[in-house]
Amino acid sequence: MRQRWFRRYSANPEGAVEGTVVAAAVIAGESIVGTDLPRVMGSIAITLTVYWFTHAYATMLAERMQTASKPAAWRETRAALFQESTVIESALPPIVLLFALWLADVKADTALTATLWLCVVDLFMFGWVGARGTELGRGARLGYALIAAAFGLVAVLLKTLLH
C-alpha cells in the first residue's frame, strides 16, 4: 500500500499539491463566514471535483493540441481523469480530519485550524516525495518540500488575518 501511494504521488505531485492548496484555500475562505464543518467538507468536495475535471480536460486538450491528431476518445478522457486523480485524492485527508473533528464535536474554528495545519504537513510531504524521485540531494529536496509547505502557510496566514 505504501509503495502504491508513493508511486502515485511521485508520478504526479503537481496534482496533489494543487488539490491540497485548493482545499486549504477553501478552508481559509469558509472560515471567514464562520460556517459549519459539513458545509466546509461539501465546499471542498464540490470545488475539487470541478477543479479535477477541469484540470484533466485541460491536460488532455493540451496534449491533443500538441499532437494535432483526431479528437480524444472516451478511453483517453478516462486516462486523463485517472492521471489527474491526485488532485481530488489529496482532499481526502483534510475531509476525513474535518469529519472526525465534527463527530468529536470540536469547535469549528479549532477544527479548521487543525485541518489547515494538516494541509501544510501534506504539502511538505508532497514536495518531498515529488523531489525524492529525482537525483537531487537532501538539501534540494528539503527546499522543494518547504516551498510546497509555504503554500499551505499562506492559507493559515490568510485565515488568521481575515478571521
Image (spheres, helix red, strand yellow):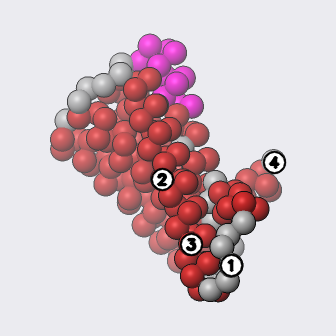
- Which of the numbered marks, if any, corresponds to residue 70? 1
Q: Earlier in the sequence, mark 3 or mark 1?
A: 3
- Residue located beneath label 4 in the image: 1
Residue 15: give x, y in percent of width and height: 56, 60
Camera-side mark, 3 or 1: 1
Label 4 CA crowd tier, 10 Å (few <14, some 14–19, many 20+)? few
Residue 103 magenta-drawn? yes
The quadrant where residue 117 appears: top left
Residue kind at label 3, given as amino acid type = Leu
Report the residue at 67% width, 70% height from top.
72
Report the residue at 44% width, 23% height from top.
38
Q: Earlier in the sequence, mark 2 or mark 4?
A: 4
Camera-side mark, 1 or 4: 1
Label 3 CA crowd tier, 10 Å (few <14, some 14–19, many 20+)? some
Report the residue at 18% width, 44% height from top.
161
Q: Earlier in the sequence, mark 2 or mark 1?
A: 2
- The magenta stretch spans which residues? 96-106
- Which of the numbered marks, if any, corresponds to residue 134? none
